[in-house]
Image: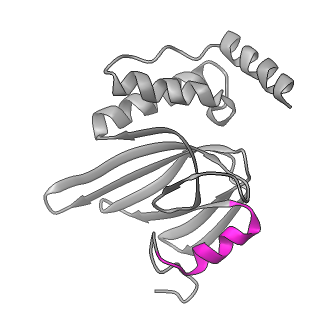
Amino acid sequence: MSDNWPAGPRGGGALSTLAADGLTHVELTWIEQKIEHWIRFGRVAQDRIIDRRRRIASFRPGAVFAFVRWASNDFGTIISRIDVVQAVGVGQPHTTLPFVRPGGDILLKVEGWPKVQQVLAAIDAVEAAGVDACDAAPDHWRHVHNRIAAGHKPRPYTMERHSAWLKRREIER
């Protein structure tokens, strides 16, 4: 293990000290068919490669990203999860999340492969509508979370909804 790699998802190490730069840092790991953590969408502000299997992706405050975690053992899948998170600034309230420092505003949290697939389909639908998923209204990701949790299909994200979000965001600034 490299001296500059974090002690673990909850431990100190490099990831804890990186948080002082005002960015949100996400530990990404790729060990084929064992542990696969990746970013499905989001604008990465910095990308630090630790070794061929690990890196740290960093996001500016306010950036929205999707973080997918999948792991298996000799008996099959042990975790399938996707979180859509809005990065926070220094001193802003946030929720802690494994592998994310300091944490963020969790817009969507889904576990289990069938539900993860529904979220991935919702992301694809946003992109098919001509909108970068990281630019979609944060409320849309909350909506997707709530609909899936209730066992319903999320409503589509349309250009009309996106235009309304852009106008609302302009007024709020």
Residue 162 in sight here: yes
Residue under the image location 13 percent in, 58 percent down: 75
Residue at the extreme left: 75
Instruction: Residue 12: say if magenta.
Output: yes
Q: Is residue 145 above or below residue 77?
A: above
**How many numbered discs, if any?**
0
Residue 44 percent across, percent down from the top left: 68, 53
Q: Is residue 164 above or below residue 52?
A: above
Instruction: Residue 67: say if magenta.
Output: no
Residue 59 percent across, percent down from the top left: 68, 54
Residue 108 percent across, percent down from the top left: 48, 37
For the N terminus, which image quadrant? bottom left
Q: Is residue 111 left or right of residue 89?
A: left
Residue under the image location 23 percent in, 52 percent down: 77
Residue 121 in sight here: no
Residue closer to the observer: 112 or 104: 104
Q: Main secondary structure of the magenta part?
A: helix
Residue closer to the observer: 7 or 54: 7
Residue 48 percent across, percent down from the top left: 65, 69
Q: Is residue 98 left or right of residue 79?
A: right
In this picture the colour scheme is: one colour
Residue under the image location 67 percent in, 68 percent down: 19
Q: Which residues are magenta?
A: 11-23
Residue at the extreme top: 160
Q: Is residue 33 left or right of residue 145?
A: left
For the C terminus, which image quadrant? top right
